[in-house]
Amino acid sequence: MRRHCTALWIVGLWALLAIPARADQLGALESILKRASVRLYDDRPVSGAQLKRIVKAGWNAATVDGTRPFEFVVIRDRGTLEQLAGATKFAKWMPGAPAAIAVVTRRDLSRHHVENGIQAVTNMYHAAQEQGLGTCFVGTAKRSEMKKILGLTGKRWKGRHLLTVLPIGHPKTGKEFKSPARVPLAETVFDGRFGQPTDALRGSRVIKSSTRKMADFLGGEQREVLQFSKTRVGKDRLRTALEMMRAAPSSKNRQPWRVVLVRDAATKQEIASAAKDPVLAQAPVVAVLATSLKPPPVRFGTQEQHDPHNNVKAGARLTRYFIRRHDPSFALANLRMGVESLGLGARVVMLNRPAQDVARTRLSTGRPIGLRNMHMLAAVGIGHVQKSQTRQTPRLPRNRVLWRK
């Protein structure tokens, strides 16, 4: 009888510990597909430990060029948040958050400081979500005014770019937060050339679970692909990674990025040679990520539905703020995470001007797409890894984090 009771006690304890699952053990697939922007918060405070964890996750982001051009300003004063809200048209809800983190990037440390900053913000999104918190990217603001409010003026802050201010808080109860409807993959992903429907995903399905946890991406260890194997990438894995990219946030949820899947060896070699990255040519699939500089064929300049958060009525004209670098950088971060969470390797190469010109010529149908119509951002080599090396993220310096009352 005593053995029987002991066995029941052990089983009960195991069940108690297993349910619910720890937030920091969320699968990467689940975390990315369920991410949603949160604009309504309750009165529960956010602890300093929680904010430190979010900042550290941002610092640990896998940057596009190996640099870490980030600085963070932690804000916990309601008055400061109210002033910041006055400097942006679409974040009047910001004072409802108990805290916020400003992400500052340094032009002197990286020419890709904006893209790197977005990689950090992506990590911060998921670090907040792991802890039951929510946030929302604020992309349109009078940044010079915000910098004055935060005291980011003077010699020390010269050459800094205020990327965003991320409000942080517990999502308000009684409201279910869902990711908005997304543009179908068929409208953003093409095969070999822009506008050409892809058969690479035909008959594919989304894999229900990933091999890695989101916590793996928020730690201080990064893997760099040095050699791809010749093993073919399965359609299901490719489809799932692209669906994870599709879940990335974008301005007014317009998803202006376009992706061309390149499998032709000659085209891959030509782009890789122009980008001066021979490893890229080895990848079975290269996803070229571009930004449409013209709004997609929707009423981008008009508010389609009433926005209760900022009291913007349906039909109101909006200031055009089609952000060329922010939106595709979120897509790039999600694509990399998606590829790596499925046991594949991702080689991210930012395209220089010669590589952009080659990509425009080789990936266009007929006359090459003009520079004013499409910006070629990056090429992502996707495949099974033959050889790689692991890099440890350097420790976060104290002078990169500024705490405001």
Image (tube, helix red, strand yellow):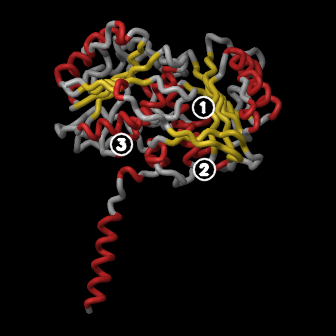
The three-letter amino acid code for the residue at tag 1 is Glu
The three-letter amino acid code for the residue at tag 2 is Gly
Left/right placement of residue 252 relative to residue 293 reads left
Q: Badge 3 is on which residue?
A: 129
* Quadrant including the C terminus: top left
Q: CA distance from mark 2 to mark 3?
A: 23 Å
Secondary element type, mark 1: helix
Q: Earlier in the sequence, mark 2 or mark 3?
A: 3
Q: Badge 2 is on which residue?
A: 343
Along the line of sight, which residue is nearer the eye, 71 or 214?
71
Decide: is 383 above or below 305.
below
Is residue 50 shown to the viewer in this render? yes
- Labels 3 & 1 near each other (Cβ < 8 A): no
Secondary element type, mark 3: helix
Crowding near pointer 3: few (<14 within 10 Å), some, many (20+)? many
Q: Earlier in the sequence, mark 3 or mark 1?
A: 3
Left/right placement of residue 92 relative to residue 279 reads left
Q: CA distance from mark 1 to mark 2?
A: 27 Å
* Quadrant including the N terminus: bottom left
Residue 203, image x, y percentages: 67, 50
Q: Badge 1 is on which residue?
A: 187
Question: Residue sitting at 71 percent across and 33 percent down?
Answer: 280
Mark 1 or mark 2, whichever is nearer to me: 2
Mark 3 or mark 1, whichever is nearer to me: 3
Residue 267, image x, y percentages: 79, 28
Residue 161, image x, y percentages: 42, 15
Q: Earlier in the sequence, mark 1 or mark 2?
A: 1
